[in-house]
Structures are given as C-alpha cells and as structure tokens.
Amino acid sequence: MRNAALMLGIIAGLIGMVVGLFGYGYSEVTAQHAEVGQMFGTFQNPGLVKFASFVGPLLAIAGGAMARARALWGGILMLLAAAAFYAAFGFNVATMFPIGFAGLGGILAIAAGKPDEPKAHF
C-alpha cells in the first residue's frame, strides 16, 4: 500500500502542477487584463488559487515521497493537497485526477498501519 501511495502522490503532484500552472497563469492574466476576466470570468478568490497552485502539487509530491518511510505524515500531506485543490478549483474535469489520486494515496498511506518493515507509524 505504501508503494501505491507513493505513485499516486507523485502522479497527483505532476498532474496538479499542470492544473496549477494554468490556474496561476489565468489569475495573473485576469489581474493584468480586465477584459479577459470580463469575457471568460474570473476566480472568486485568486489569492487562494495562487496559493493552492503552488502548495497543492508540492504537498502531493512531498507526501508521495514520504509515503514509504513515514506513511502517516505522507498520507496527511496528500490529504491536505487534495483539500487544497478542491478548495481552490472545486471538483471538475481538470482537477478530478489530482484530487482523486492525492486523496486515495493519502488514505492508502494512512491505512498502511502494518508496513513491510517491522516499524509501524502508530
């Protein structure tokens, strides 16, 4: 389960980086050019979008990387990444895989109470 959590966290972070780049870039474009925001709409909270665009993928990748050695901490980080993506972007076609992969990876990492090594995190 720890290896699956590792892979899911890293994949969620990589997909989340693409979502984050577009989210951060679009919020910057709408801040600089108001006519783009009037035509296509703006984010309700661009500060949250910018923050989650950076922190979400970072938490997912860090949580995935920690999943084998410290499963509890890695799982918590991946769940925080999923929550950050959901809070900033909602659940839609662009965020369903980062949210799903980070959430499932976090659950798997936390559920790995009996690891392959004799040292448990509980």
Image (tube, helix red, strand yellow):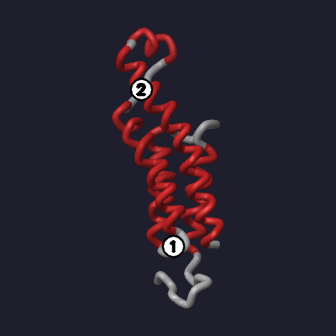
Quadrant of residue 38 within the rendered picture: top left
Label 1 crowd (10 A; few <14 / some 14-19 / many >=20)? many
Q: Which residue occupies 50% across, 59% down?
A: 78
Q: Is residue 67 above or below residue 35?
A: below
Mark 1 or 2, nearer chain start = 2
Q: Which residue occupies 51% across, 52% down?
A: 82
- On screen, residue 32 versus residue 41, left or right, reads left
Q: Is residue 19 above or below residue 6?
A: above
Label 2 crowd (10 A; few <14 / some 14-19 / many >=20)? many
Name the spot of residue 65 as percent of width and height, x first.
Answer: 52, 64
Name the spot of residue 2 as percent of width and height, x first.
Answer: 60, 72
Q: Could you tell me how many numbered marks the image carries?
A: 2
Secondary element under disc 2, as helix, strand or loop, is: helix
Residue annotated with mark 1:
71
Give the residue furthest to the top.
35
- Report the Cα–Cα distance between label 1 and label 2: 34 Å
Residue annotated with mark 2:
27
Q: Which residue occupies 51% across, 31% down?
A: 22
- On screen, residue 53 versus residue 32, left or right, reads right
- Given the image, on which type of amino acid does mark 2 rest? Ser
Q: Which residue occupies 61% across, 60% down?
A: 104
Quadrant of residue 94 within the rendered picture: top right
Name the spot of residue 16 as percent of width and height, x first.
Answer: 54, 44
Q: Is residue 25 above or below residue 99?
A: above
Quadrant containing the N terminus is bottom right
Name the spot of residue 99 as percent of width and height, x first.
Answer: 57, 49
Secondary element under disc 1, as helix, strand or loop, is: helix
- Given the image, on which type of amino acid does mark 1 rest? Ala
Quadrant of residue 80 within the rendered picture: bottom left
